[in-house]
Image: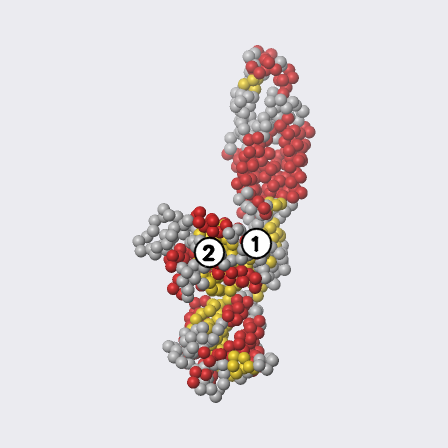
């Protein structure tokens, strides 16, 4: 379907009438010959000389050509586009939270695997949950691990690969030896209140033991869940005849499921547990909810191209009607060319020159005819050519007046600038891709953050660590859709969040980092880079590392392989520290200031570069421009990312140049011996 993206520009159609009415006639300074006997000559010819100027009316054909060029330019400004058929993508319609028991009893080996061997309960649960998650496409999933206390491992996310990896890393007793089922449900309710607006919400609680000290009793938590429209399915894992910590409280689990309209089930072995999840898959049918996107193709180059060809033909016809004159005394077009070059440099060259190309490069061939026509117009635009044939050059040199007062910007210069802008715009300059909303960045990005006490220094407000968290959010905003992981390090390195497309998960954990939670004091960035490299290797996609730190030890990289600069992933460093002369608030923890020379020497070993932190987003832009990207279409999108046609912005100055031709005196002047 054909549409106009900016139809309001059509209001400019009548603008030339205002130009002709309101703008005074153009009276350029022109070279002339002083004739001492002018009065006598006038008497002999019977004509009286007059002062002032008159604006002649151009021929009808030329007026028609000029108006046609203007109308086509305005149509191009209105930005015609072709809308393709809509693309559709299914969005999540159900929020599902898995509450997984990691208490000490989950290491009991009373499950039988496919080979007949006994495996511990947690291993069996992981296998079944992996299979369950594989069938959860279209849902958002959150993870809560609980033992002696509940912990939110990840809030609701569509990135089920990250959920798989977090489940794989879960270990018995990592949340404590006891079981606080009621508190886990209470935390789940809080997560729903904060992060879920979808009405169809489900909790699946997997536990093998009775509640051993929740602040919120499980039955009370179930009643609150029912009031909020949340369904709880309870899955008992373990031996019903067990006692002590391994004892099951089936009555409580059945009551929780019954209160919320959910289902209780007991899994005596791995096969039975798998059957329970098959039943859960069939509990409710998800209503299909979709969002649509209609790709747009730019068509402004069609009317602009027609206008360009018409103007070239128009000027060619004018040349055929002009008498051939000598080129002596004509002025070069250097000022106009310089102005246009500066305009193009300002508009185009901030982009990466390595990506700059033209979508329709054959239009650049129009530069040849344009240059030839301009040369011909300049040769035939000398106002003194007739005098040079009739008068001795030595005498003419003394009679010419106003030769140095001619305008450097006139019709010929405007014509040159307009043609150049039009040709470049129609050729379609492009340097960046505009992906479909359904595409994603398949390259991986690992964000490594130093979490040591000196990162709490307040020479950068609110603190170095807090600013690092803010910069991570900015980086993820610029790299929307990319798979990112978060690694924190001090004396040891830890994977905070595996690679995920869900930027909110990275942002949430990055802002919660604190030196107090790091288990080992010290400063070992090499361990963090090894962990980042392992994440990228597992992803099997190209990727980069951005390291956010204030400084590095002298021997920071001694544990890295000698060929790291060739075999390791690309590394960029954001130096989160203020220079030595920056003010430090009272009470700020002591920390060394930014040492540019030391950082330069340190990162040189990685073949990396560092960017000092800035108050604006220029540091983030510099970092992200150097990271690896690879845009691919999602499953819902059968189109590839497209190059953005940046020629449209050149229409604004071009339209102003076309309007100049409607000024009285401007149009005729070019054809009457005043190239300007």
Q: Position of residue 321 (x, y in %)?
A: 67, 28
Residue closest to the far bottom: 241
Quadrant showing the N terminus: bottom right
- Of the residues under marks 2 and 1, which one precedes in the sequence? 2
Residue 117 to residue 322: above or below: below
Residue 87 to residue 404: above or below: below
Q: Position of residue 120 (x, y in %)?
A: 52, 79
**In the depicted view, which residue is nearer to us: 69 or 293?**
293
Left or right, residue 581 beside residue 55: left
Colour setting: secondary structure
Residue 647: assigned label: none
How many marks do you count on the picture? 2
* Mark 2 vs 1: CB contact within 8 A: no
3D distance between C-alphas at marks 2 and 1 = 18 Å
Residue position for label 1: 566
Quadrant showing the C terminus: top right
Residue 556: assigned label: 2
Residue 665 falls in image quadrant: top right
Q: Residues within 10 Å of mark 2 (few under 14, many from 20)?
A: some
Q: Secondary structure at mark 1?
A: helix
Q: Secondary structure at mark 2?
A: loop
Residue 259 to residue 334: above or below: below
Whether residue 524 appears in this view of the structure is yes
Q: Residue sitting at 65 percent across and 17 percent down?
A: 389
**In the depicted view, which residue is nearer to us: 435 or 558?**
558
Q: Residue sitting at 40 percent across and 62 percent down?
A: 521
Q: Position of residue 388 (x, y in %)?
A: 63, 17
Q: Residues within 10 Å of mark 1 (few under 14, many from 20)?
A: few
Q: Position of residue 90 (x, y in %)?
A: 57, 66
Left or right, residue 409 beside residue 524: right
Residue closest to the far right: 320
Q: Residue sitting at 44 percent across and 49 percent down?
A: 598
């Amino acid at each position: 379907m054909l549409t106009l993206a900016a139809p309001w520009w059509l209001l400019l159609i009548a603008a030339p009438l205002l130009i002709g009415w309101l703008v005074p006639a153009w009276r350029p300074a022109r070279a002339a010959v002083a004739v001492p006997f002018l009065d006598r000559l006038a008497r002999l010819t019977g004509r009286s000389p007059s002062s002032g100027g008159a604006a002649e009316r151009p021929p009808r054909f030329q007026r028609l050509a000029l108006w046609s060029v203007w109308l086509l330019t305005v149509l191009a400004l209105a930005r015609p586009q072709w809308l393709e058929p809509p693309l559709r993508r299914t969005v999540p319609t159900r929020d599902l939270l898995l509450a997984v028991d990691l208490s000490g009893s989950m290491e009991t080996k009373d499950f039988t695997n496919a080979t007949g061997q006994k495996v511990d309960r947690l291993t069996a649960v992981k296998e079944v949950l992996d299979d369950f998650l594989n069938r959860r496409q279209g849902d958002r999933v959150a993870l809560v691990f609980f033992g002696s206390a509940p912990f939110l491992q990840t809030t609701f996310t569509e990135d089920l690969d990250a959920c798989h990896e977090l489940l794989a890393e879960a270990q018995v007793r990592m949340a404590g030896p006891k079981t606080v089922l009621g508190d886990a449900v209470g935390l789940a309710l809080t997560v729903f209140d904060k992060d879920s607006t979808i009405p169809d919400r489900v909790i699946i609680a997997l536990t093998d033991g009775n509640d051993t000290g929740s602040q919120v009793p499980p039955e009370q938590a179930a009643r609150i869940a029912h009031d909020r429209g949340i369904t709880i399915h309870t899955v008992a894992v373990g031996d019903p005849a067990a006692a002590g910590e391994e004892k099951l409280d089936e009555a409580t689990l059945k009551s929780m499921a019954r209160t919320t309209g959910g289902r209780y089930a007991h899994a005596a072995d791995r096969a039975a547990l798998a059957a329970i999840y098959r039943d859960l898959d069939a509990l409710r049918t998800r209503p299909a909810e979709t969002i649509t996107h209609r790709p747009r193709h730019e068509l402004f180059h069609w009317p602009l191209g027609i206008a360009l060809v018409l103007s070239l033909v128009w000027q060619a016809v004018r040349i055929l009607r002009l008498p051939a004159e000598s080129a002596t005394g004509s002025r070069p077009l250097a000022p106009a060319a310089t102005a246009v070059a500066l305009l193009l440099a300002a508009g185009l060259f901030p982009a990466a020159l390595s990506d700059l190309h033209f979508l329709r490069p054959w239009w650049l061939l129009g530069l040849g005819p344009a240059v030839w026509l301009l040369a011909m117009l300049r040769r035939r635009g000398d106002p003194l050519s007739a005098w040079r044939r009739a008068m001795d050059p030595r005498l003419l040199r003394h009679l010419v007046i106003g030769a140095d007062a001619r305008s450097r910007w006139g019709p010929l210069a405007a014509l040159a600038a307009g043609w150049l802008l039009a040709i470049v715009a129609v050729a379609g300059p492009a340097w960046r891709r505009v992906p479909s909303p359904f595409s994603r960045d398949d390259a991986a990005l690992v964000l490594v953050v130093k979490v040591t006490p000196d990162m709490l220094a307040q020479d950068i407000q609110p603190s170095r660590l807090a600013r690092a968290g803010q910069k991570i959010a900015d980086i993820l905003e610029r790299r929307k859709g990319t798979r990112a992981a978060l690694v924190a390090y001090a004396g040891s390195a830890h994977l905070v969040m595996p690679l995920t497309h869900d930027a909110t998960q990275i942002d949430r954990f990055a802002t919660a980092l604190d030196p107090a939670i790091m288990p080992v004091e010290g400063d070992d960035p090499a361990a963090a880079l090894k962990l980042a490299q392992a994440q990228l290797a597992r992803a099997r996609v190209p990727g980069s590392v951005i390291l956010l730190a204030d400084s590095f030890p002298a021997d920071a990289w001694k544990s890295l392989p000698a060929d790291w600069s060739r075999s390791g992933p690309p590394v960029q460093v954001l130096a989160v520290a203020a220079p030595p002369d920056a003010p430090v608030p009272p009470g700020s923890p002591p920390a060394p200031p930014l040492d540019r020379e030391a950082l330069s020497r340190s990162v040189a070993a990685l073949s990396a570069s560092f960017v000092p932190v800035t108050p604006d987003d220029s540091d983030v832009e510099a970092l992200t421009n150097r990271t690896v990207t690879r845009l691919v279409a999602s499953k819902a999108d059968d189109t590839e990312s497209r190059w953005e046609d940046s020629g449209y912005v050149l229409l604004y100055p071009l339209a102003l140049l076309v309007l100049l031709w409607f000024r009285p005196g401007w149009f005729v002047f070019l054809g009457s011996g005043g190239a300007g």
